[in-house]
Image: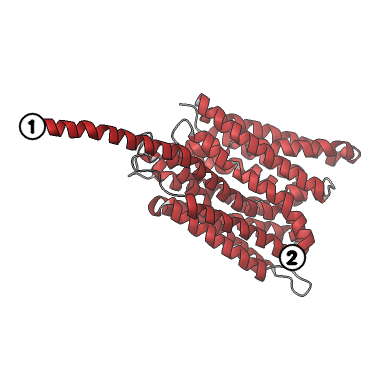
């Protein structure tokens, strides 16, 4: 009798277990898009800061009375702050949870930007020096470095292999989305209302995103965490920092970001000084780069998920980026050596800059997905932090190097170096298995 009762209890328990599993799957299916939305919002809010502030470079230069070298320094230190903090934030994410790190980072970034709006803005009575501006932008980068690894790890936990490339690429559209909004809004805001309004608006973006994260970001249901799905290349107990393939992809990502950073930080100065363009054309051109990058990132994520060709895609776009910047270099060289042709070549130069900017920004979601897959979802924070450390080393070095390149080789030299860096990244990316 007891055996029969036990058997009946077991049979009755199976439907309950099946119903619970179905419920957990439904929760994952519905809630994962909210998590993705939080990742997009978090990256967009910080992208509006680290891409939007450089878009105001012309007004930074005049408002703070900076030379080109000083302008490169302050913009470079914003990138250095992120580079120094990305790996520590990533390690902390894998140990402390993505929710805690994202909330801490977004809240601290919002508070700091609000403080900058009150303390470090030029006025008729006071012009902040290079040192306080550079120091505050460095701290902004240190705090904002929390966003990438924590949001990426959350998405890796909620999405499975076969859909992660698409999800991570959508997340990466946040970078051109935030940068595009910054390029459209912040230069005009800086020219009409000053930098207090610029920093205040950026603080509001981070604060609102922190509220969304507090409301909706959490761990997947028990048993539904993708980190336990068994598809990780590296086990949860190991570290991706000992995997040479992880280092190769991270270094290639950093190299391929050199031409991208050149566009993000000095394209406005290039279009103003070399092309003689006004604020409307500059903002529209930079926004076109960011919108094109968004479209390409979504397409590339879906395309590589369907075809399983992430490594081939990365190598291809390294070459395409090299060709695009070589074309831009040629156009600038012709316009420089033949001044009579410059009015004719102006439109072609703007178009070439947009195409090159889109090419060199299209691959990010694919690269980060491949990197996180190699590391394993439970170690994604560390791997993504390592990659973004290389990325923001580029954000630090490129703005400092460009003024020197302008002295030595004019804009031709700047875009030639960008093409060379894209070409060097090609063999470093892993070959298809």
Residue in the image at 43% along x and 49% along y: 218
Badge 2, how many Cα within 10 Å: few under 14, some, many 20+?
many
Q: Position of residue 425 (x, y in %)?
A: 57, 37
Q: Which residue is mark 2?
A: 64
Could you say which is closer to the camera, residue 94 or residue 257? 94
Toward the top, the furthest residue is: 307
Q: Quadrant of residue 130?
A: bottom right
- Whichever of callouts 2 and 1 sits on the residue coming sooner in the sequence is 1
Q: CA distance from mark 2 to mark 1?
A: 88 Å
Q: Nearer the viewer, mark 2 or mark 1?
A: 1
Of the numbered discs in the image, which one, if any, rests on residue 91?
Answer: none
- Quadrant of residue 338 within the rendered picture: top right
Residue topped by disc 1: 1
Q: Residue at x 88, y 36 (%)?
A: 344
Q: Residue at x 72, y 35 (%)?
A: 355
Q: Specify few, some or many for label 1: CA neighbours under 10 Å numbering under 14, 14-19, or 20 or more.
A: few
Element on which disc 2 rests: loop
């Amino acid at each position: 009798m007891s055996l029969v009762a036990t058997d009946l209890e077991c049979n009755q328990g199976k439907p309950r277990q099946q119903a619970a599993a179905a419920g957990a799957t439904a929760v994952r299916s519905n809630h994962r898009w909210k998590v993705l939305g939080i990742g997009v919002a978090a990256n967009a809010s910080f992208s509006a800061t680290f891409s939007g502030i450089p878009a105001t470079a012309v007004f930074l230069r005049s408002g703070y009375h900076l030379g080109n070298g000083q302008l490169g320094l302050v913009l470079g230190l914003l990138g250095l702050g992120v580079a120094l903090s990305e790996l520590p934030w990533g390690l902390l994410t894998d140990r402390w949870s993505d929710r805690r790190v994202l909330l801490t980072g977004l809240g601290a970034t919002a508070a700091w930007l609000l403080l900058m709006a009150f303390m470090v803005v030029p006025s008729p009575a006071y012009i902040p020096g290079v040192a306080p501006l550079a120091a505050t932008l460095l701290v902004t980068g240190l705090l904002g470095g929390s966003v990438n690894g924590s949001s990426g790890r959350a998405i890796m936990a909620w999405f499975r292999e076969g859909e992660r490339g698409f999800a991570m690429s959508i997340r990466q559209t946040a970078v051109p989305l935030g940068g595009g909004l910054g390029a459209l809004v912040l230069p005009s805001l800086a020219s009409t209302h000053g930098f207090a309004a610029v920093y205040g608006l950026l603080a509001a973006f981070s604060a609102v995103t922190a509220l969304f994260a507090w409301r909706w970001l959490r761990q997947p249901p028990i048993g539904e965490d993708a980190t336990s799905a068994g598809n990780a290349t590296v086990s949860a107990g190991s570290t991706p920092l000992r995997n040479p393939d992880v280092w190769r992809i991270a270094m290639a990502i950093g190299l391929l970001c050199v031409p991208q950073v050149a566009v993000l930080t000095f394209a406005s100065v290039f279009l103003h000084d070399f092309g003689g363009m006004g604020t409307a054309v500059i903002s529209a051109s930079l926004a076109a780069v960011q919108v094109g990058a968004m479209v390409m990132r979504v397409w590339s994520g879906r395309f590589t998920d369907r075809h399983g060709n992430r490594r081939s895609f990365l190598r291809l776009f390294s070459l395409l980026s090299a060709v695009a910047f070589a074309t831009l270099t040629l156009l600038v060289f012709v316009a420089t050596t033949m001044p009579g042709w410059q009015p004719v070549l102006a439109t072609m130069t703007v178009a070439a800059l947009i195409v090159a900017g889109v090419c060199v920004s299209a691959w990010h979601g694919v690269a980060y997905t491949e990197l996180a897959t190699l590391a394993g979802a439970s170690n994604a924070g560390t791997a993504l932090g390592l990659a973004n450390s290389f990325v923001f080393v580029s954000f630090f070095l490129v703005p400092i190097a460009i003024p020197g390149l302008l002295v030595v080789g004019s804009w031709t030299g700047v875009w030639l170096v960008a093409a060379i860096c894209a070409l060097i990244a090609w063999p470093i990316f892993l070959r298809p298995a």
